[in-house]
Image (cartoon, rainbow, N blue to C red):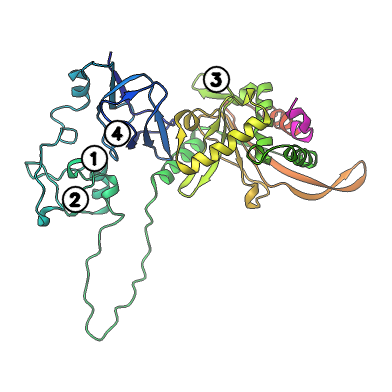
Amino acid sequence: MATSIVMPQMGYDMKEGKVVRWFKKEGDDVARGEVIAEIETDKAVVEFEAYTSGVLGKIVADEGVAIPVGELIAVITEPGEAVPDDIVTAATPADSPEKAAPAPVEAPAPAAAAAPATGAGEVRASPLARRLARERGIDLSTITGSGPGGRIVESDIPEQAAPASAAAPVGTAAPAPMTSENVELSRMRQAIARVTVDSKREAPHFYVTIEVDMTKAMSFRRDINDELDAEKRVSVNDLIVKASAIAIGRHPKFNSFFRDDHLQMNASINVGIAIALESGLIVPGISACESKSLVEIATASRDLVSRANSGTLRNEEYSGTTFSVSNLGMFDVDSFTAIIFPPHAAVLAVGKVKEQPVVRDGDLAVAQIMKATLSTDHRVADGAEAAQFLVEIKKLLENPVSLVI
């Protein structure tokens, strides 16, 4: 039986995505769980795994073309099964020139190469390319398309229209104009703007801050790393993720989602780690932290950061988090407050660990102190509950042996 493969929802606010490249071609065998494509969202390029086995009978979505979430991108069939006409017809209505199959086109003459067009003279371009061209004041007939059949796709549209040249009088130098500059936002930056505004508007944030004495934790980390290979060594952030997972097990409300008239209590503790990429911020996660050891979390975290930077995250890592940690300690930041990543109930923001004077039993001493701030959705928990949860994390970090027993 044929299975429709649709553009997946990789994040609660995702509206469309595009296939960056197909790893399979029509007629290839496909195994369940096998990576068959890379899909670009607003925030990242994510590997897409087949959710059934069979044969890739039909590729519907061209590479580089924006496709709304839920629309057909491919069809997987049983071996020897023909692709049902009704599946493909439903995805590409005959009266839609944007999705109709292009007629064979002869190689254009050099003078006409910049204007790929249909028989009716209409320039062939994806809907997203048309919108970008309209917003930027660009004539599509001047663009050479790189898509299938010469179709113009998003990446073909320049950032702005080429300015018209104006000759200055001979012997005079044209003064440099004093103008402001409009910088085009990347798709990721637009998504970050949308998510953070929605979060602050819809979730009533409140903040609780605490100081954590990390002296024992830092010593514990040194001791444990002395016994580990380089690829398994534990970072300060790994200690925080592990402590958060244990604390969530004792305060499960902070692993829930607010859903109108109820809380969705999530069974698995999937801790998202805020990762700053050159193009913006993403929050992929480590799944099932409740059942992972400290070393397993450290290994998973290092792998997650590496694949986030190389653009090979999996869908569940990108969209399945239930709590998040944001750490700016490596940037010499003492403390900050973070915006909750929807639909999470809370986010933990931590600063750097630094030496400072403390009073212990009436005597002055030097300790390694870290400030931690919990941002909480007031619809989910009250101040006292947030304080108890944060104190739980503090106790675990100040007694680090509890993280491994």
SS under mark 2: helix
User: What is the C-alpha distance between the residues marked 2 and 1?
Assistant: 12 Å
- Which residue was labeled with disc 1? 127
Task: Give the left or right position of residue 245, taking residue 9 as reference.
Answer: right
Amino acid at the residue labelled 2: Leu
Which residues are drawn in magenta? 395-405
- Determine whether label 1 and label 3 are within 8 Å by CB: no
User: What is the C-alpha distance between the residues marked 1 and 3?
Assistant: 39 Å
Q: Which of marks 2 and 3 is nearer the N terminus?
A: 2
- Determine whether label 3 and label 4 are within 8 Å by CB: no
Q: Residue at 10% x, 38% y: name it.
A: 104
| Neighbour tally class for label 2: few under 14, some 14-19, many 20 plus, Cα within 10 Å | many
Amino acid at the residue labelled 1: Pro
Q: Which of marks 1 and 3 is nearer the N terminus?
A: 1
Q: Which of marks 4 and 2 is nearer the N terminus?
A: 4
Q: Residue at 61% x, 34% y: name it.
A: 299
Quarter of the image where the N terminus is located? top left
User: What is the number of the mark on residue 140?
Assistant: 2
